[in-house]
Amino acid sequence: MLGAARRQLGSGPMLGQVLRRLRPAGGDERCERVLPPRQRNIILHVQMTVRDALNSALDEEMSADPSVFLMGEEVGEYQGAYKITKGLLDKYGPDRVLDTPITEAGFTGIGVGAAYHGLRPVVEFMTFNFSMQAIDHIINSAAKSNYMSAGQISVPIVFRGPNGAAAGVGAQHSQCYAAWYAHVPGLKVLTPYSAEDARGLLKAAIRDPDPVIFLENELLYGESFPVSAEVLDSSFCLPIGKAKIEREGKDVTITARWLVMLFRSNALLKGFSSTDANYLSIFLMYFHARFCPQAAEILSKEGINAEVINLRSIRPLDRATIHASVRKTNRLVTVEEGFPQHGVGAEICMSVVEECFEYLDAPVERIAGADVPMPYAANIERMAVPQVIFFVFHHIFLGCFIRW
Amino acid sequence: MAAAALLRRLPAARAPATAFMAARPISDSTATLTIETSIPFTAHLVDPPSRDVTTTPAELMTFFRDMSLMRRMEIAADSLYKAKLIRGFCHLYDGQEAVAVGMEAAITRSDSIITAYRDHCTYLARGGDLVSAFAELMGREGGCSRGKGGSMHFYKKDANFYGGHGIVGAQGQLFEALNISALWKLPAILVCENNHYGMGTAEWRAAKSPAYYKRGDYVPGLKVDGMDVLAVKQACKFAKDHAVANGPIVLEMDTYRYHGHSMSDPGSTYRTRDEISGVRQERDPIERVRKLIYAHDLATAAELKDMEKEIRKDVDAAIAKAKEISMPDTSELFTNVYKKGYGVESFGPDRKEMRATLP
């Protein structure tokens, strides 16, 4: 397969020239390209699932750049374990969509080697739990190479797949690896939430010259989101390292990254009277971005105006947006799904303490998964992931406002 | 076809013993029977064991009963999953029963077993009971892992069953295990339950050499008809003797799973329905033993049917009982994180309210 690709692209000094012709320099510039004004005025909102967003992004990037190829278990003939790569084998053939044996260390190694030679692999882990079989290659062969070689060897590879908890899959299939990967310099770590995020960030990841960990979530694949014409355009791309303010607010900042099991908590909140001038920034991490708008709605009924920030990028973290929000709202809650100790929320808290401590009117509140391996039984599994009821009540009301 | 060949080798069948049906009980005799395996063993770096397996009528009846129980349990689990009483992943073992049952017949409970996620029947073979199996599948506190493990994480330490694991593949790790067990002459038997498909990928698409029994290279191996419980028993007995004396040995069990990889896989996009029904017709492990039972006049069709009805009732009763068991207490969220927690505090997502000290 690689031989065929090389024959297409040439080899030796020609390869670099050909690649440069195919992918113009300054990928980031393309991501910040803004459509001309008249196109921006066309508000066409189509519903798109995250699954379709990912599939279309892969399709378009493979079409635009013949050095992009896919590799992973069941990505080809099976159409993808979660159907993300559906139809791509038929369209691009077995040289560009490779079904691998069940051998993560092996195919990650091959992917990194291909990236060393200038190809752009997109390696799928059926879940990121299986990436632990390959983590030495991800860290030591991919993340550190550009540094160790003083810039000679860059690794334009994307590792993508579902991360974090699904429903009832037990301890070995539910871990969130965001904190682990975001800990490592040399990696970029993205956490899309909506269909727009999925499309824009995956395209950005594929075009990026560095190794990118692209953390999806199984429970979001079937969720539909409205997307505009701009998002549907094949040149659409989101910048890496920029968070999105999903909901503007003034009372509290909530940072979010992923999906957290949310239950409506109206019943519990009935006992509370609204507090005035309560501002809250809730940073929701990961999929919990879905909770945040729900939580924000609940809070707004109580007179608390929450600003919800969808982080999108864990590494690099958009500290500027986070700090600006906290300066505006003076209260911060971070929400994430993974284990709490040394988690992403801990980093955000420290960053805020370093840069805008004097703006805080209350201590930073942190909501994360339970500090235990994921149990299987439904009732305790529910207790192991954040619930909106918890963080709205205890962390926001009590933590951010009533005590302070 | 293999069973037919076997039957041809036996003395001409006697007339159906209808005269004896009412009077003769199902045989529980311990008289020795010698039965030939379906096919000879294929060996790598070792002389294969004989095709003639010694067994007893009592043992054959036990094989029939145990495998039928496993079959019924897995089919019931299918229904429970569709009824959403089982959540997450559920990997069923029906078709592969002969491997679990034959293996247990050759080893003891002080021999340890560890396996992957297709573990329900291994648990049962190790002495696990139906109620705790179903309770675990449904996430109840009466489960073998108290509801905290789920389908892929059944354990039974007192029977030296070390689980039930979800992460597989790791071909490099297999070679590391082979090397070190050979170097240090460890009494390890590496059993490959070769059901010919890794999820949706056929073995010829995933392995340069699907002759897994040879994969050990310097480690001897045996290829076994995994649908023939007597062959499995013979191979495991041979392997145990070999491992204890000489170090590791690989056993490749040529078996088949009727269900897809898991409940979310129909199992028919990468295999034909003809292939599946073909194996069921020709090689089903339970049918093979049934034919042996008839051939040796150990029980009648009616008696076996009664036994199956009994098994069905037992399984239904176990499910009913398991449904009555409550879910784990919420305090179980924090139990068993450590064996010795040093009084460390552990937090739930709501750090203010949900916290516990780990003893």
Image (cartoon, coloured by chain):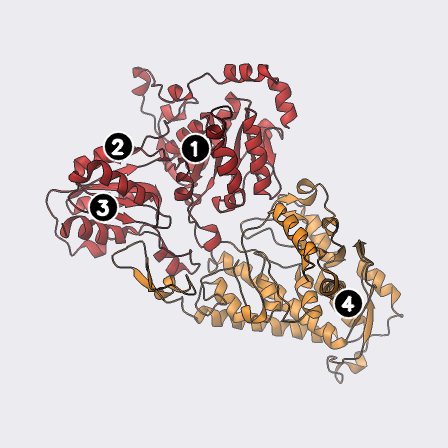
Establish whether labels 3 and 4 are both on one chain.
no
The image shows a total of numbered marks equal to 4
The residue at which mark 3 appears reads as: A364
The Cα atoms of the two marked residues, 1 and 2, are separated by 22 Å
Extreme residue toward the left, this view: A276
Instruction: Name the residue carrying label 2.
Output: A321
Residue at 37% over, 62% down: B334
Q: Relative to A86, is B239 above or below?
A: below
Q: Which chain is red?
A: A
Residue at x-position 43% and y-position 32% = A186
| Residue plotted at (23% across, 35% down) | A323
Residue A240: x and y, percent? 37, 29
Q: Is residue B174 left or right of residue B281?
A: left
Residue where numbered disc 4 is placed: B291
Q: Secondary structure at mark 2?
A: helix
C-beta proximity under 8 Å, tags 3 and 4:
no
Drawing shade for chain B: orange
Label 4 resides on the chain identified as: B
Q: Mark 3 or 4, which is nearer the eye?
A: 3
